[in-house]
Image (cartoon, grey):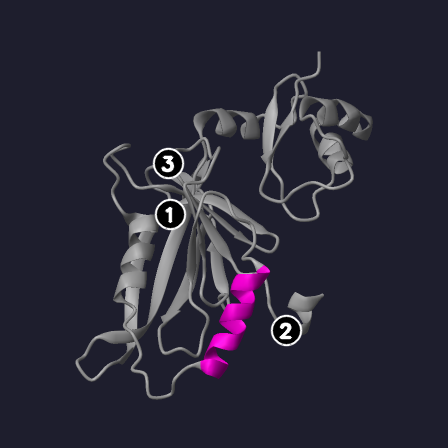
Amino acid sequence: MIAGALGIIEKMRIEVYSDIKYELPLKTFFVQVNPESYTISKSVEFCEGEAIGTSSQNLKFNKIGSEEVSFDFIFDSSGVLPPAKIKDGKVTKISLTDNLIDVLKPAIANPLEEAATIEVELEAFKSLVSGYYGDKHETRYLRLIWGGYLLECRLTNISILYKMFKKDGRPIRAIATCKFKGTQSYEEMQAKQNQQSPDVTHQRIIEQQDKITLLAEETYSDNQYYIDVAKANNLLSFKKLTTGERLMLPALK
């Protein structure tokens, strides 16, 4: 109620993982400003076959490409916007205390104080989403979460547009355009391709508005199996599922 009265809104976050198991995030990044929009694309790939002497092609299905999404993230150190935050481990919300400090800070800021640069914040962000880590010899696995949207992915491209500068030319505002591509483990791909088979164990990442009865109906063609799903996941209550968590849908014997 207090948060709503102060106009505090839920921030988009990026969870950073060391591997594709997505078990426990190393860091959680909260954006400075929620994106105004984002673009999702998904491709269907075909093998093109053309018989000699014909002008048309026979498109034979090859595969469905992974989901791709593009976001613009604003970085601003002028003091008019609350800062982005990087937290250790899994953090689903910024604390009310931190939010209150962010809301009040512009009102008590020293107008004569020179704005800091955003170089440190940008480097920390780039290290999280695109840095090379020697322990795994690759970049990190990411999970994007905002409202009902959730995507397990890797960063494929980042470009930065610098917009405002100090007198010495150092930046105080920038827009980082990031492109992400969905990723799945081999086991998850196999399960997803065979989702209609009730004798195979499946896993689902819970999305907003998901209900255990509907997931049971989708997997087993019978929503009465929600009790088996609840038992397999040690759920005390089946009425409320946590967005972003994994739910195991056991094989029927």
User: Is 180 left, or right, of 233 in this rendering?
Assistant: left
Which residue reaches farthest left?
168
Give the spatial CA distance, label 3 vs label 1.
50 Å
- Kind of residue indicated by mark 3: Ser
Q: Residues within 10 Å of mark 3 (few under 14, many from 20)?
A: some
Number of numbered discs visible in the structure rendering = 3
The residue depicted at 36 percent of the width and 63 percent of the height is 177
Residue 102 counted in the magenta span: yes
- Check residue 79 in the rendering and tell me which mark sits there, or answer none: none
- Kind of residue indicated by mark 1: Ser
The residue depicted at 54 percent of the width and 65 percent of the height is 99
Q: Residues within 10 Å of mark 1 (few under 14, many from 20)?
A: few
**Mark 3, residue position:** 18
User: Is 167 left, or right, of 151 in this rendering?
Assistant: left
Q: Residues within 10 Å of mark 2 (few under 14, many from 20)?
A: few
The residue depicted at 69 percent of the width and 40 percent of the height is 241
Which residue reaches farthest top?
253
**Mark 1, residue position:** 55
Residue 101 counted in the magenta span: yes
Give the spatial CA distance, label 1 vs label 2.
64 Å
Of circles 3 and 1, the one toward us is 3
**Mark 2, residue position:** 6
Near-viewer residue (154 or 128): 128
Give the spatial CA distance, label 2 vs label 3.
36 Å
Near-viewer residue (27 or 75): 27
Look at the image and give the residue range highlighted in magenta.
96-108
Q: Answer with mark 2 or mark 3, whichever residue precedes in sequence.
A: 2
- Kind of residue indicated by mark 2: Leu
Q: Answer with mark 3 or mark 1, whichever residue precedes in sequence.
A: 3
Q: Secondary structure at mark 1?
A: loop
Vertical side of 14 occupied by 173: above or below = below
